[in-house]
Image: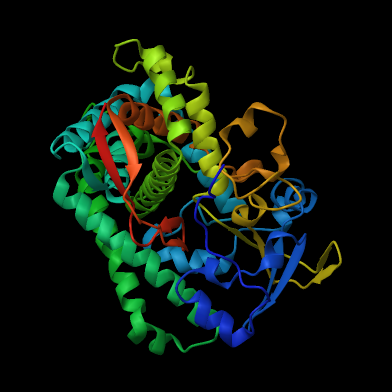
Amino acid sequence: MSQCPFHPKPYKNKASTLLTFLLKRRSWLDGLYERSYEMQTGYVKMPNFDLYVINDPKEVKRIMVDEVREFPKSAFLHELLKPLLGESIFTTNGEIWSKQRELLRPSFEMTRISKVFNLMSEAVKDMMKRFEKYPNDSIIEVDEMMTFVTADVIFRTIMSSKLDEQKGKKILHAFVNFQEQSVHTAMRKMFRFPKWFSYILGDRKRLKSGEIIREILSDIIKPRYNAVSEGKNLGNEDILESLLLVVDAKTNQRFSFEEILDQVAMLFLAGHETTASSLTWTLYLLSLYPQEQEKAYEEVRQILNGEEIQISHLRQFKFLTNVFKESLRLYPPVGFFAREAKKDTKIRDKNIKKGSGVVVAPWLIHRHKHFWDNPNDFNPSRFDKEYRKDAYLPFGMGERICIGQGFAMQEAILILASILKIYKLELESGFVPDVVGRLTIRSANGMNIKFSKR
């Protein structure tokens, strides 16, 4: 293949602490250096705490599967995400996490593709109508389009509510702000900036963005929460309904309004942001590699044979699924999983003190020279052969693996097949994405792709 998909070029040598601060203020990817992609374990000394990066798949399994209780989710990350997610299953640990997981189980049943396919389909048809409004051969910024459609899918499946354009834009901009400011806030925390100073420098913008998103969700949840509290049945069959009705077996208590808001905010964030990121990068890769795009198009054309996409078609798109898997490898939506050591321990040659940060980074593991052949190349067919399953973790691993991964895979395949069926994609001439690592891996300058009708 003539070119590699774009990724930030790592520095030759490790940066000093001050340079790390200056580089990582924008994106944590900017602070990586060449050995980051070859090492098994790494160490970063921060003024406030020690940080260890673990790339060795055997040790990754230990952290995320075998000794998961000894490496809980990072309190630092919990504090960072709290203004948006509250006390949700995404960042809680131990007993609280187990209880929330049990209470959420009926809701996750509602995400089965057989139950949500029609709602998903309607959102995708609306997306295609938005594409149709553009003249043929238009350059379209697809990042915003993918964020809107995945948010719409989540709104419909969680709350039986179609996402309108105005709310969508408001949420999108609030979340972009939240992501941007979270990186700055994290770096200031690591470098012990006083809270009041951080607040003036931009943390208030982050807190406000979290509030905006929670208010929009709250406006939809509140009337239904009140109706259920008054014993009314509104007849909705969606995820919110199961959250409103579920009862804790031990206490016989339902979720409080605040608890439901926290879980819905988590489901919304995890359910749309990660998939939007993955779809944008997949469209980029298909635009960059016309041969692979044609192969995917031919598969879609032959399987559909002029029909509309049905649920039964989704599993038949083998090559398209490989394209998406390879996109998840090159641009994993969550580039790092933050944990902390619950007690003094040893990982390979590193003596790790209690309270130290432990990072498992799919971004590094997926591009690691020891685990993958030509790791920076786009090669969907690598998933037809034997590959390092222990070095592929776009959805995480162990008991905290993303519970919505089946939902996300099916949604992505439906969206990609719908686009490829109608359009030929080509990257805007001279366009280079600006890859940034924040809460998710995104392109800071969007993604400009030419859409031509087939």
Measured from the top left, where is residue 295 in percent x and y?
46, 25
Measured from the top left, where is residue 174 in percent x and y?
28, 62
* Quarter of the picture holding the N terminus: top right
Q: Is residue 134 above or below residue 429?
A: above
Measured from the top left, where is residue 331 in percent x and y?
52, 50
Residue 358 visible in the snapshot = yes
Residue 249 visible in the snapshot = no
- The answer to whether residue 200 is left or right of residue 353 is left
- Image point (73%, 68%), residue name: 42
Q: Is residue 345 above or below residue 277?
A: below
Measured from the top left, where is residue 110 in percent x and y?
40, 28
- Image point (69%, 58%), residue name: 71
* Quarter of the picture holding the C terminus: top left
Color encoding of the figure: rainbow
Q: Nearer the viewer, residue 138 or 143?
A: 138
Q: Nearer the viewer, residue 141 or 100?
A: 141
- The answer to whether residue 240 is left or right of residue 317 is left
- How many marks are shown on the rendered structure? 0
Query: Which residue is the extreme one toward the front?
Result: 2
Q: Nearer the viewer, residue 28 or 450?
A: 450
Q: Nearer the viewer, residue 263 or 201?
A: 201
Q: Quadrant of residue 205?
A: bottom left
